[in-house]
Amino acid sequence: MVESLLKSIPAAASATNPLLPEPSNTTHTVNADFDPHHGAVVTPELIHAVADAAHLDGETLEAGESKINLTVQRRYLSDLAALGKVKCIH
């Protein structure tokens, strides 16, 4: 804990910003987009990788040709972003 005269701030979850709160299980509905120009086509294997990163069941994900719609907990967004074929998350 970082002590303050006003309030206590939880310890850092991020090495780059010591004041960020720890990741939460708040959910966000997002689109994970993939760049088909770089060979990133949505395949069953890619859906499985996205589901694993987001800690979800791949059978529940809505997939298009170059994007996957999902509801993911905030704490898993960085795992999703770390997938090499993800172009953007919005």
Image: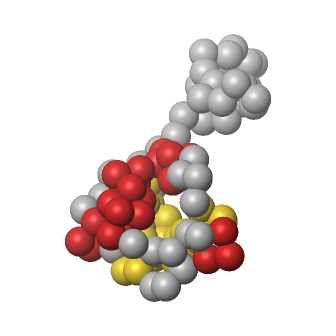
- Quarter of the picture containing the C terminus is bottom right
User: Residue 90: in sight, yes or no?
Assistant: no
Q: Residue at x 41, y 64 (%)?
A: 46
Q: How are the colours assigned in the image?
A: secondary structure
Please tell me which residue lies in front, 22 or 88: 88
The residue that appears at 61% across and 77% down in the rendered structure is 36
The image quadrant that residue 39 belongs to is bottom right
Report the number of numbered marks.
0
| Quarter of the image where one finds residue 17 | top right
**The furthest residue to the bottom:** 64
Left or right relative to 14: residue 51: left
- Residue at 75% in and 18% down: 5
Name the residue at 26% across, 73% down: 60
- Vertical placement of residue 9 versus 50, above or below: above
- In the rendered image, the vertical position of residue 2 relative to residue 43, given as above or below: above
Residue 78: x %, y % from top left:
56, 47
The x and y percentages for residue 58 are 28, 66
83 relative position to 69: left or right: right
Q: Quadrant of residue 9?
A: top right
Q: Nearer the viewer, residue 34 or 61?
A: 34
Q: Residue 74: horizontal and vertical position, in percent?
A: 50, 52
Whether residue 82 is visible to the viewer of this picture, yes or no, is yes
Across and down, in percent, residue 54 comes to 40, 54
Q: Quadrant of the N terminus?
A: top right
